Image (spheres, rainbow, N blue to C red):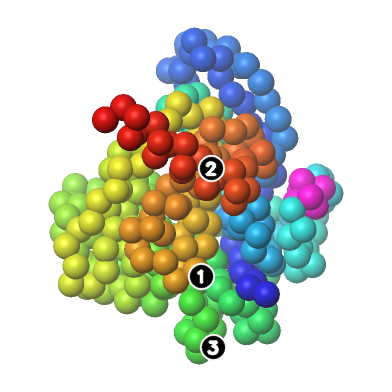
Amino acid sequence: MDKVYLYGMISMSTVYVLNDDFVFPRPNEYAEINKSVSSIGGEAANSAIMLSKLGIKTKLDGNWLSEKNADKIRNILKPFNIDITRLKTRQNYGTEEIVITDKNSRTVFGNYASFHRGEKQWNPPRETDIQNATFVSLDPYFKDESLLAAELCVENQKPYVTLDCKYDDYIAQNAEAVILSHELRDQAYKGKNMRDVFKNYQTYCRGLVIFTFGSDELWYGRKEENINRFKPYKIEPVDTTGAGDSFRSGVIYGLMKSWDDRSTVEFASAVSACVCLTFPHTLNAPGLDGIIKFMENYSEEINKNK
């Protein structure tokens, strides 16, 4: 059976959704909270949940969990049959976030900056887990350990998908696919021509390169290809949290099924759209049958309106 090893971020999350009449406020302004719920954050955690919903066996590994949140996180993950035997609990460690979301944005408050600046709070990757996997999902945030995970994947000829790495980074260069969000591009390549940046990724990276732009047209391509474009599904989002994490799950699924790049990107966009239509994001998102049905219904609606 296919199995994905996910090495990366797992975080306790509390999500607040604003009333539809409000947007995230400026300083000294007011906004009305419609509902809130305990959830889970972290790229690896949400990717694992969606891959599980797609019928893929998953194993989750990464940062340590704080004592106060460990049981909550394990209970949230339990219904999805994710292997969490590698997760460790440590006092006064781990990450936690508050997410405030409206129809068009999500704003995150957490302790990620201090987490990344401080002492190590994560497991090293285990080679046997990589060897036993069909595919690997790799977050780049654990410094030398993330690099080691990529090196072990290459050494053991295991394909992996990553996100938000610079084009001169070993992790990006050897990935089966690398997905770049506007957060990374704004930080690392501010003021640069994005076409030139995309071409640099194509030059340096061996796999599929994808630039996402939220609800706007995304770019994708491989070495020596023109920039291909895909318009994401037009929806009225309920909660955009986890959209990028679920998109990566769709990319991994498509690559595991040996689909062409267009089909992979289209499916990943549908996974992300379905997550954005549910609250809280991945926890209540549909599985494979629901995503396929969404794509069929969307296509029928488009054809009807032509």
Return the residue nearer the eye: 106 or 279: 279
Q: Position of residue 237 (x, y in %)?
A: 48, 29
Q: Which residue is mark 2?
A: 293
- Residue 70 inside the magenta-drawn segment: no
Q: Which residue is mark 1?
A: 256
Q: Position of residue 183 (x, y in %)?
A: 38, 46
User: Secondary structure of the magenta portion, mostly?
Assistant: helix
- The answer for how far apart the CA atoms under marks 2 and 3 are is 37 Å
Residue plotted at (66% across, 81% down): 132
Residue plotted at (75% across, 65% down): 83
User: Badge 3: how crowded within 10 Å, few (<14), some, or many (20+)?
Assistant: some
| 3 or 1: tag closer to the N-terminus | 3
Q: Is residue 54 above or below residue 14?
A: below
Return the residue nearer the eye: 257 or 181: 257
- The answer for how far apart the CA atoms under marks 3 and 1 are is 17 Å
- The answer for how far apart the CA atoms under marks 2 and 1 are is 21 Å
Looking at numbered disc 3 in the image, what kind of residue is underneath it?
A: Asn
Q: Which residue is mark 3?
A: 156
Residue 265 seen in this snapshot: yes
Q: Which residues are magenta?
A: 73-79
Q: Assign the C terminus to one quadrant of the image.
A: top left
Return the residue nearer the eye: 60 or 300: 300
